Amino acid sequence: MIGIDIASIARIEKNLARYGDIFLKKFLSDEEIKLLATPSGWKASSVAGFWAAKEACAKALGVGISEELRFFDMHLSKSPKNAPIMRLEQNKMQAFRIKSIHLSISHDGGFAIAVVSLEKRRAFGLF
């Protein structure tokens, strides 16, 4: 299953300027916010990439951001080589029968884009 999302970096910049960390706390955990922090604040392109990643995951699962899947059910981090990593809460991994999650984030030309690919577990011996 694949999900994709694109986010306007300018829209994220406006939200950061207007609401600051209140905006971030609507969809990111404290650990994710720390991961995005720079000495001069938050880099809007990186924040936009995280937004797009969570939206892309919801699309790959075939649901919206709702009771079924909340922003805080999805967790973003980085590998030792700075590659983005996404994981879901264990109960969501089981509920959606997810075996693995693959994420790619990029930004250019005023937009951030994310692609999430999900591999599902087999259902009781079925192919």
Image (tube, helix red, strand yellow):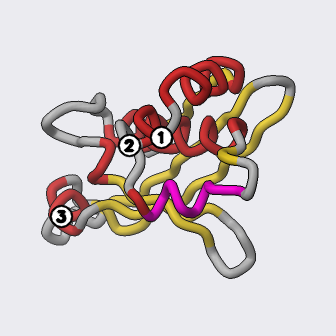
Q: Give the magenta part as a residue range.
A: 31-38
Q: Give the residue at mark 3.
A: 94
Q: Give the residue at mark 1.
A: 21
In the rendered view, tell whether residue 109 sits above or below residue 4: above
Q: Position of residue 8 (x, y in %)?
A: 66, 21
In the rendered view, tell whether residue 109 sits above or below residue 122: above
Q: Position of residue 71 (x, y in %)?
A: 32, 43
Position of 63 with respect to 116 (left or right) is left
Q: Which mark is residue 3?
A: none
The residue positioned 44% from the left and 32% from the top of the image is 23
Residue type at tag 1 = Asp
The residue positioned 70% from the left and 20% from the top of the image is 10
Position of 96 with respect to 10 (left or right) is left
Spatial CA span between label 2 and label 1: 6 Å
* Quarter of the N terminus within the rendering: top left
- Specify which label sits upstream in the sequence, 3 or 2: 2
Q: Residue 81: within the magenta?
A: no
Q: Which mark is residue 25?
A: 2
Q: Position of residue 4 (x, y in %)?
A: 55, 34
The residue lying furthest to the right in this view is 109
Q: Nearer the viewer, mark 2 or mark 1?
A: 1
Q: Which of the 4 quarters of the picture holds residue 89? A: bottom left
Magenta stretch secondary structure, dominant: helix
Q: Position of residue 75 (x, y in %)?
A: 40, 59
Residue type at tag 2 = Lys
The residue positioned 56% from the left and 30% from the top of the image is 5
Q: Are marks 2 and 1 in contact (CB under 8 Å)?
A: yes
* Quarter of the C terminus within the rendering: bottom left
